[in-house]
Image: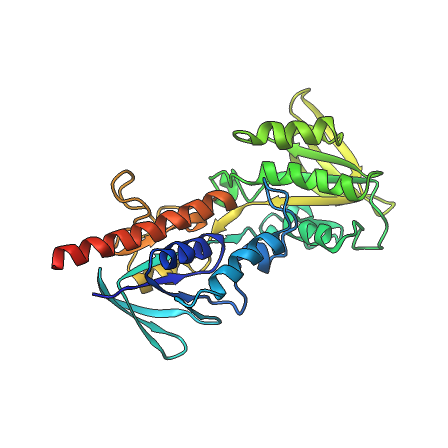
Amino acid sequence: MQDTVLIVGSGPSGLSAAAQVAGAGYKVVMVEKEETLGGAPILSGYAKLVPSGEWAKDAIGRMVKRVEDDKAVTIHKGTRVTQLEGEPGNFTAKLSNNKQIKAGAVVLATGFTHFDSVNKPEWGFGTYPDVLTSTQMEQMVASGKIACPSDGRVPERVAILLCVGSRDRQIGREWCSKICCTVSANLAIEIKEMSPETDVFIYYMDIRTFGLYEDRFYWKSQEEFKTKFVKARIAEVTASGDGRLLVKGEDTLVKRPIVIPFDMVVHAIGMDPNQDNPEISKVFGVELEKHGFLQKGEQYTNTCGTSRPGVYSCGAAYGPETIDDSIAQGAAAGGRAVMDLAALVRKAG
């Protein structure tokens, strides 16, 4: 019986799972395909996190340090799992660095892929330099300066377009990405804090700032930071004669066409399944749900489970998820893994 848990992925959920397993007295082997730990918040250069308002590099940095400093955790960076054989309590994993790992359980904290805005070409990304994604705008906020990429001027008007790569059956994205409304409201606040003279507009189909986020971000962005929310269907983003961007569509509240000039347009991009999921499914012997995320095990008695016994998962590997919930699910997955290993030991004894 192995006393090691293999954790694949080092984003917020994977780091949380590793800390949970190590804290319970078990060993951890963490495998991360990138050369840097921390997942999307670090690799994509997120600015301040929702809802804490803490800089991503600081918050996730603490989680990384906690795991890196734990002697019970062995980390393989720039590495993938190429094969997994065995059964609960006794798995053998082969790694791309030619090493072999023995583990009693596996946690897949493999996360998601940001939607690629080139799949929504009518909204101007890739055509106009002042059309950005929300991750690029986060990087700009983190850099400390809001400026149009085309010429460096401070934008007078910024439009944030919601549901880019979400709730769009025409491009095969039927799901809500859960985080975009709140992140965009927070991004509007950050833009105004750094550039008070800039007006920010958010174009939406529906606003889904669930729970306490309604007051903390939706209303705060409107009442304190004067963000304008416009319920609309956007048709296209084009360029005007003076070099500004034109957002064209329909204001769905008053049922009339709109053509509004902006200096910058931001795509609030959604969360796609990890682009590696077909390979992950094959290597780990787990099923995918119809959209391509990992398939959950039985909802109520197989917490954090997958279709393969002894292999667990958490966070955005299952579907769009917030960072805080991913962290909680990572801890749950780590706890479930060691609980099942302890049960196997009792049964064997």
- Choose between 162 and 23: the one closer to the eye: 23
At x 55% / y 50%, what residue is drawn? 115
At x 71% / y 28%, what residue is drawn? 222
Residue 137 x/y as whole percent: 69, 49
Residue sitting farthest toward the bottom: 98
- Choose between 288 and 337: the one closer to the eye: 337
Please tell me in which quadrant of the rendered image residue 300 appears: top left
Residue 277 x/y as whole percent: 40, 57
- Establish if 252 lies above or below 338: above
- Choose between 68 and 194: the one closer to the eye: 68
Q: Quadrant of the N terminus?
A: bottom left
Residue 77 x/y as whole percent: 48, 71
User: Taking 242 as reference, is 239 left or right?
Assistant: left
- Establish if 98 lies above or below 286: below
Please tell me in which quadrant of the rendered image residue 281 appears: bottom left
User: Taking 229 as reference, is 274 left or right?
Assistant: left
At x 79% / y 44%, what residue is drawn? 194
| Residue 239 in view here | no
| Residue 99 in view here | yes
User: Taking 81 as reference, is 156 left or right?
Assistant: right
